[in-house]
Image (cartoon, rainbow, N blue to C red):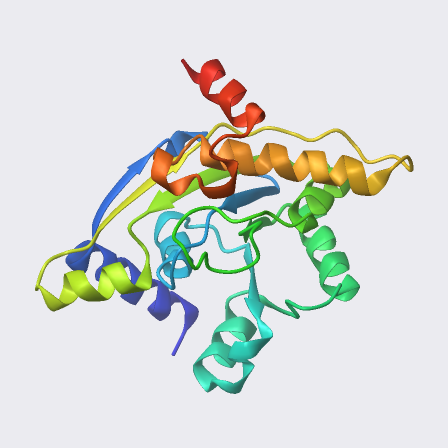
Amino acid sequence: MSVQFVRAIIHLFFRLFIRLEADGLENLPAQGGFIIAANHLGRLDVPLVYHLLERRDISLMVAEKYHKYAIYRWLVKNMNAIWVNRFGADFSVLRAMLQRLRQGSVLVIAPEGTRSPTGALIEGKPGVSYLAAKAGVPIVPVGSTGTQDSLVKSTFLRFKKPHIALKVGKPFNLPPLDGRDRDSVLEGYTTEIMCQIAALLPPEYRGVYAEHPRLQAVLSEQE
């Protein structure tokens, strides 16, 4: 089973069984390295990436809990993904991702680190901020709705097509990291990323960032 065949199956699946509404795809850079930072609701988020991006240099992080499944091991090996330990600081993964970004690859990552149990944004982690600032690449925020596993399943059981809505924001860059109070700086960078994502989502999906002052500022800038 080739990677091209997998991509063809993914394209066919979305065209036949999903009602997809995508806005802002023109904001995705045509070339060069960048990070797509997105909210994470369900298992369809990953194949959605391969449906929308035709690039061959997409990098994903896959949680170690899936290593026991042969199909995931094959996908990680053949689709440019990297295993990641969600419960520790895996510096070898960070180094590998930095190298890929500097070589012009695309990293797709959820700053929350896992699927949201509520469907709304949970607190972001600093890994994305660190990678973007160290690699000097732009971040493209993405907000999506409709990919929750329970929602997709219930819609299929009613013999209907799930409606997935996705919105791509404008790229932005983070200032380089210096040696001063790095933890505090990364916390601020992470808040910026999460508020940029939240601004692309309906109010009920904004979660812990719903009332954040920075989100209100971003929303005002978009008016």
The answer, for residue 169, to whether it is visible in the render is: yes
Residue name at image x 44 percent, y 81 percent = 71
Residue name at image x 40 percent, y 30 percent = 26
Q: Is residue 113 left or right of residue 132?
A: left
Residue name at image x 18 percent, y 64 percent = 154
Decide: is 36 above or below 148. Answer: above
Number of labels in the image equals 0
In the rendered view of the protein, which quadrant contains the C terminus? top left
Is 214 or 73 nearer to us in this picture?
Answer: 214
Q: Residue furthest left?
A: 159
Decide: is 41 above or below 181. Answer: below
Q: Residue furthest right?
A: 179
Q: Position of residue 18 (x, y in %)?
A: 20, 55
The answer to which image quadrant residue 61 occupies is: bottom right
Q: Is residue 62 left or right of residue 158?
A: right
In the rendered view of the protein, which quadrant contains the N terminus? bottom left
